[in-house]
Each structure stands twice: as structure tokens, then as C-alpha cells.
Amino acid sequence: MTQRLEYVVSIMSRDRVGIVAGVSAAIRDLGGNIDAMSQTVMRGYFTIIITASFPEGTDMEKARARIEASGDPGELSVSIKPWESSAAEPYCEVCDQFVLSIMGEDSPGIIAKICGFLASRNINIEDLYAYVDDGKFIFISQLRVPRAKDVRQLQIDIEGLYKGKGMVVHLQHENIFLATQKVDFRGGEN
Amino acid sequence: MLRTEDIITTIRMLQKENLDVRTVTLGLNLLECAGPEIDQVCEKIHRKIVSKAGRLASVCEEIGAKYGIPVVNKRLALSPVSALAEAHGPAGTLKMAKAIDDAAGEVCVDLVGGYSALVQKGMTPGERNLIESLPEALSRTKRVCASVNVASTAAGINMDAILLLGETILKIADKTRDRDGFGCAKLVVFANVPEDNPFMAGAYLGAGEPECVVNIGVSGPGVVKRALDRLRESSPQATLGDVAERVKITSFRVTRVGELIGREVAAELGVSFGIVDLSLAPTPKVGDSVGEIFQAMGISKIGGPGSTAALALLNDAVKKGGLFASSSVGGLSGAFIPVCEDSTLAAAVANGTLTLEKLEAMTSVCSVGLDMIAIPGDVDADTLSAIIADEAAIGVVNSKTTALRLIPVPGKKAGDKAVFGGLFGESVIMPVRNVGSASEFVRHGGRIPAPLQSLKN
């Protein structure tokens, strides 16, 4: 039986109907099998990340070119890397998921400041969405915070980053969102 | 992963629409403190409150911060103090009230309920001691709240107790005349009192409850009001069925917040989690009003035709949303209409659209009763008793809780203003019509028998 190797494929393009159809057909034709994919469109631009396995010996540069050719010339930016199994290991053994939200007047450097702070505290961003609506900046991210961290101190430190700048900053445990949004949530049992 | 829209919905409820945990109320059984020596009883009460509730405030702060939701009040609900008063006169009972007040201050709770008696079928000496001590207890303590259950569907209505309370309420008002009779705001007269209600002033730890239990009161009239505003903006043709559905969904979310906080606080304190009570409990703050929900439903004059139907819809939808959200719903769970505590209801009283008679009708379909209503100080005790009896009858016949917080304001008349401050608010004093016309009736005393439970029509 032919051994299969796993790769990560990422694609960026201006959005249109049929990109995923073309890309998935190209992967099928290359003998690949898609294991997972996540796609989003932001302000008219499309991105997708795919993990897929291909038969051993597949020329991945040719595979990249084949996937790229599923779009019009110059349309898709495609990159492929071998998937490293260690990437799926948990970032920390005992973590809690928190939601960090920042809202206020837009100005350059807001994201750099908070993300620099989080990196300095070894806190990983697992999901991030930010946009400007009518001059108002909205940043929502989902973080994995090691349980050993003093959350109250973390909240104070993050609020301190924007003190006096009219920004509303909140770091909240994800259970408050799950409780209010998920019908089958059962948390905090004692 | 959570959806961004869901995150924004929750953040909006918490930060812009005044959703908070109104109270984390720790129920505490005091029966083990009973004894023949009053000073020892007081010492035991003090020790028990401090040992069991010492960490309550700090744990609430910590868990509130974790979820980004304020826990506005931390409170205690004690087992009925009347049970400890059997061997002591009103003076001894008053000593207990002071011991409770001091201990509550020490553990940083703002109010403590359970200075209570259950007299729906008759009165023990301890219960009489407690009722007779109320004027002193409520005027000389800061945090103690009292309640007396005078009626139940199973027992009927104890008119002797109601007569005694009519007189007692006037005495409490007189003792606190410098504060517009504020002491009466800390006494609730109940029919069918719930045993696990976390809201003040009527919270106490019922007979079937655990030794120590966390009950949660969540509010959120602002959240419901904004949800209805958004419905009206997005669907101008929305039916009242759509309105009920929107209230139900919103109530679901609010209840979930309460349960999450309650279970975590209970686990941290190592005690049982009891119930979550979602009641739309207004505060005088604009945007935190049940009256504004009426307006959002299209009732332009609160107290005018349609008000009772609107309140029935609201109360029912709140209960349904709460019951789907949690299997541990209890307390009152519905809509409150405390006049002084709701700036929009108080305004409706001031402009004459909301009257005592209409409020009484509305209480037949909502959670509580004639709540936080300032009336003229010269209303006589018999008339007060008759109003209590009317409200109790609504509760007893309809198998629901009703309650009264009537505040006769000494030296003031209808149209004057009573000001209590803080969460207790203010209101124009409401006229009471036909004063003195029911003395003969209430002075019969005795007990109005329990009502029939069949032929319900």
C-alpha cells in the first residue's frame, strides 16, 4: 500500500464563485485526500487553509502549480508546506479559553500593541477578527491562557495598555459566551 | 470556535444593556444558634455568619471579574429568625437583629433577609415577638430585611396577622419618619412566599432548603427592552407572538449568565448551588426599567388599557426562557413592578396614568405585588390591612406569590414626593381611595379559609 504524506496548503485570492470547487478537484486529481479545511472571505478576499495527504513521491512543486492552475493565470497565491504532527500538540497542558475584546477609536498600532503584549506573556491567539466600522475599531480574539496565569492581573495589565485612550477592553472567560449562546452548554457544575 | 456575532451579542448585553448579576444570595440556616441565653444566641449567630459568609464578597468579585460581569450585590438569606425568638421577647429578638446587622456588615453584604415569620395559619410566641420587634429592628439596623407570610393557597389568609401588620407598618413608618418611612421598604408581606427567593427584601431560607446554599438573582430589563427595540426596527410588523419569542430568547441568555456565576460561586465556597431567579428587577437608572419595556411593546400610557395584557405576556415569556435555560430555576422568576425603584413607573404614577387599583390588577399576572408604593402617611391601619388582604387574596386564589411593600410616608399626602435614595428610588405619593371603608370587614379577624382547588373558572 502506498504511504501517504500530509501537507498544509494555503490559498489567497480575490473572491469569486467556484474557487473551492476548482481547488478540491485539483487535489483529487493529484491523488490527494483532504483531511481538514477552513475558509473565510474578508472584504472581498478569499483565504483557505487545507490539510491534505498525498501519495508518497508526489512532486509537491508540481502539485502547487496544478492547484494554482485551477484558477485563472495569476489569480491564486498558493503555498504548500509539509504538515508537522507536533503542530497539533496543545500549546499548553492546562489552559482556559478567553475572549479579548477591544473597542474604541481607530489609530495605527493598536493591534501591534496588544499582540506584542500577549506574545510577551506567552499567550497564544487562536482566533482573531478585527475591523473598522464608521471609524470605530473592533477587535475580537480568542486566546488560550495557561491556567497558572493570574487572570485578574492580566486584565489589569491589558486595560493599562489603553488607559486614557477611550478604549473599552475586556478579557472574559469563554464560558460566559458559551452559556449565553449554546443551547446545550453545561458548565460550572459542582 | 465561537462565532464573532455571538461574541458581540453577549458583549452588548453585558456592557451596553445593563445586564448584571443583581444578587448572589447565600442562604444560611441559623437553627443551630437557638438557645435560652440571648447573648449566647447572638454570639452564635455572629460566628456562623462570619464563618460561612466571610469569603462571599471576595469570591463574587473574583468570579465576576473572570467573566466580565458585575455581581452588584452580595446578600444573605437566613432561616426565619422567629424560630430563634420563641424563648425571647421582642427586646431579645431586637438584639438578634442587631447581631445579624453587625455580622452582615463585617462580611460586606449590603442586605440580609430572613428576619421573618410564617404565620399563614397561626402565630407562635416567637413569631409575634418578631413582628412586634419590627419597628425597632427596621429603624435601628441598616441591613436587616424582614418578611411575613400571612397567607397561602393551602392555609388561607390569616386576618389576625394582617391586622397586626397594618398597625406594625404604621409604627415602622413613624420610627423612620425622618427618612420618609423608609423602614417599610425593608418589610415584605407575602402570600405564598417562595422558599428560595434571592431578591430583597423578601429573601429567606425556607424549611426544605440545605444548610447553606447559593441562590442567584439576575435581572436585565435593559437587555429585554433593547431586544424589543431591535425587533421593532428590523420587523415593524412583528406580532405579539414575535415579541414573546424575543423576550423568551433574551431571558434564556440572561438566565444562563446567572447559572454560570451561581454554580461557580457555590463550588468555590464549597456549598450547594440552589436556584437562579431571572426576574426583571428594575433600578432607578434610565435603561434599567420594566416601564420602558411596556413602552417598547407599544403601551404609551403605563397603567392604561393593555397594561395588564402586556405584563402577562412579559411575565410568561420570561419564565419560559428561564425554564428552558436551566433546570434550577426558582424564586420569583418573572417581572417586578416596584414603583419607586423604576423611574418610568414612578413617572406614570406622577402623571396619574398608573393607579393603585390598576397596579393591583397587574399583580394578578406578574411575579410580585404592590411593591415599593409610597402612600399618604395618614392612611389608617385598617385600610392598610384591607389592601394587604386584597393582595393576599389574589395570590391565594391564583396559586401564586403576591407581596406588598407599602410605605406610608408620615406627614406627606398624595402628590407629594417620597425619596428613599439608591436602589430604592423615589416616587410621587399615590392616593388611596375609599380610606376607612373596610374597617368592619378586616376587624372580623380570624382566617379566610383556603380556596377551592377545583371548578376553576
Image (tube, coloured by chain):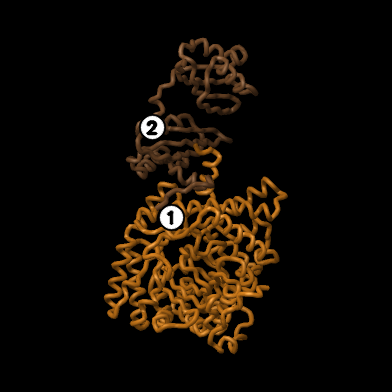
Chain colours: A brown, B orange
Name the residue carrying label 2: A90
> What residue appears at the point 31 percent right and 67 percent down from the top-left corner?
B48
Secondary structure beneath dot 1 equals helix
Q: Give the chain letter at badge 1.
A: B
Residue A167 visible: yes
Name the residue carrying label 1: B262
Q: Left or right: where does residue B207 sit relative to residue B442? A: left
Q: Nearer the viewer, mark 1 or mark 2?
A: 2
Residue B222 visible: no
Under mark 1, the amino acid is: Gly
State which quarter of the image contains the C terminus of chain B: bottom right
Under mark 2, the amino acid is: Pro
**In the image, which disc is placed on residue B91?**
none
Secondary structure beneath dot 2 equals loop
* Mark 2 burial class by Cα count in 10 Å: few <14, some 14-19, many 20+: few
The percent position of residue B272, horizontal first and vertical second, equals 39, 59
The percent position of residue B173, horizontal first and vertical second, equals 48, 77
CB contact under 8 Å: marks 1 and 2: no
Vertical arrangement, residue A66 with respect to residue B163, above or below: above
* Mark 1 burial class by Cα count in 10 Å: few <14, some 14-19, many 20+: many
**Distance of mark 1 from mark 2, alpha carbons?**
30 Å
Vertical arrangement, residue B182 with respect to residue B90, above or below: above
Q: Left or right: where does residue B394 sit relative to residue A36? A: right
> What residue appears at the point 40 percent right and 62 percent down from the top-left corner?
B213
The percent position of residue B413, horizontal first and vertical second, equals 57, 77
Q: Please tell me how many numbered marks the rendered image carries.
A: 2
Q: Give the chain letter at badge 2.
A: A
Outermost residue on the front side: it is A1
The percent position of residue A60, horizontal first and vertical second, equals 49, 12
> What residue appears at the point 50 percent right and 25 percent down from the top-left corner?
A35
